[in-house]
Image: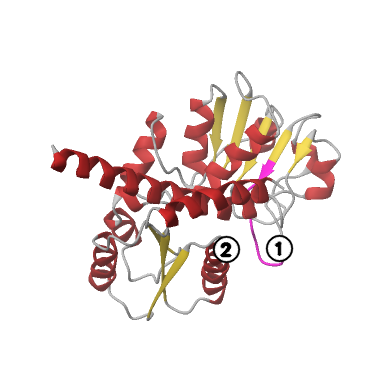
């Protein structure tokens, strides 16, 4: 429902951009032949096309070097018709993924993967936060879930999920505990949470007896077999609200990617208009 609301709000914005001579364009880069990654890229491309957003798909062989990938990203950075760049994670092990992410122009980092973008998000003025954290915050706000003063426990600390969602919740005045594989007494900590964000990448990891009555549970996990990080049935009995897998955070994540691409296109159009005014003066 939230995903559809976000996408429906973008249709008119895309039409206005096209009337002004700008067609939003998202470039997706897939390195190698991982079937799951290929499926994700296809899903994102199809979602773009349904809204009239151009999907520029670049598929590079698994033998691609870091330097070759950086060259491809740089070419897209310099392409005025491209508004957003998404490098599908993971890349082959021999490729320096962090260096590739950080080569993406901050103006086109619609997936929120650059170090610069993370820093902006943490400081509270990021334009394009990582899409799954942005989706989680969107769901929270859409359903009017109180955050200020609440204790949020984030299980997971990845640079594109656990860490940025912790920063976003902190910026919303939650008290945030970020847990990870070295955390002692994890069930006891989770049991203190008003809001639980599961982002650990382990199927059915968080159990119902870990969570307290009335807690809000947001499952950002997606494991083989369409299984989340939360043991849904047992947690459902305790939670006041819970997101399912599939069909919960995932669709909203894609919707946020589309929104960021449209945002970027609008910022590009505005920048062009401002430059034209300056030149005319």
Please, what secondary structure does the residue beneath circle 1 have? loop
The color scheme shown is secondary structure
Horizontal and vertical percent position of residue 236: 82, 42
In the image, residue 33 sits, relative to residue 6, either above or below, namely below
Are the residues flagged by discs 1 and 2 in contact, CB closer than 8 Å? no
Is 259 a magenta residue?
Answer: no
Picture quarter with the C terminus: top left
Tell me the residue that label 1 is attached to: 226
Is 224 a magenta residue?
Answer: yes
Number of other residues with Cα within 10 Å of mark 2, as a class: few under 14, some 14 to 19, many 20 or more: some
- Label 1 or label 2, whichever comes before in sequence order: 2
Tell me the residue that label 2 is attached to: 47
Q: Residue at x 54, y 71 (%)?
A: 42
Q: Which residues are magenta?
A: 218-226
In this picture, residue 75 sits left or right of residue 280: right
Residue in the foreground of this view, choosing between 247 and 236: 247
In this picture, residue 164 sits left or right of residue 209: left
In the image, residue 228 sits, relative to residue 32, either above or below, namely above
Residue 123, quarter of the rendered image: top left
Horizontal and vertical percent position of residue 41: 51, 69
Residue in the foreground of this view, choosing between 28 and 172: 28
Please, what secondary structure does the residue beneath circle 2 have? helix
The CA span between labels 1 and 2 is: 20 Å
* Residue placed furthest toward the right: 237
Q: Residue at x 53, y 25 (%)?
A: 172
* Residue placed furthest toward the top: 149
Q: Main secondary structure of the magenta part?
A: loop
């Amino acid at each position: 429902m939230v995903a559809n609301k976000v996408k429906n709000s973008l249709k008119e914005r895309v039409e206005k951009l096209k009337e002004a001579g700008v067609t939003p364009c998202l470039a997706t880069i897939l390195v190698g032949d991982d079937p799951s990654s290929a499926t994700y890229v296809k899903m994102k491309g199809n979602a773009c096309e349904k809204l009239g957003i151009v999907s520029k798909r670049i598929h590079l062989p698994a033998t691609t070097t870091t330097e070759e990938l950086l060259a491809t990203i740089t070419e897209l950075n310099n392409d005025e018709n491209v508004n957003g760049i998404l490098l599908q994670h993971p890349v082959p092990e021999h490729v320096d993924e962090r260096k590739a992410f950080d080569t993406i122009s901050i103006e086109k980092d619609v997936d929120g993967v650059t170090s610069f973008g993370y820093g902006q998000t943490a400081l509270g003025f990021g334009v394009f936060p990582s899409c799954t954290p942005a989706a989680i915050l969107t769901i929270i706000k859409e359903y009017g879930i109180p955050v200020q003063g609440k204790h949020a426990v984030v299980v997971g600390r990845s640079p594109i999920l656990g860490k940025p969602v912790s920063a976003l919740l902190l910026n919303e005045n939650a008290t945030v505990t970020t847990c990870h594989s070295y955390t002692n007494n994890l069930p006891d900590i989770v049991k203190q949470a008003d809001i639980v964000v599961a982002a650990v990448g382990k199927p059915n990891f968080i159990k119902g007896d870990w969570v307290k009555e009335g807690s809000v549970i947001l499952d950002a996990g997606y494991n083989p077999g369409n299984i989340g990080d939360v043991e849904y049935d047992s947690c459902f009995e305790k939670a006041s609200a819970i997101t399912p897998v599939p069909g919960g955070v995932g669709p909203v994540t894609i919707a946020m990617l589309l929104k960021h691409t449209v945002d970027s296109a609008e910022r590009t159009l505005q920048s062009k208009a401002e430059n034209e005014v300056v030149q005319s003066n």
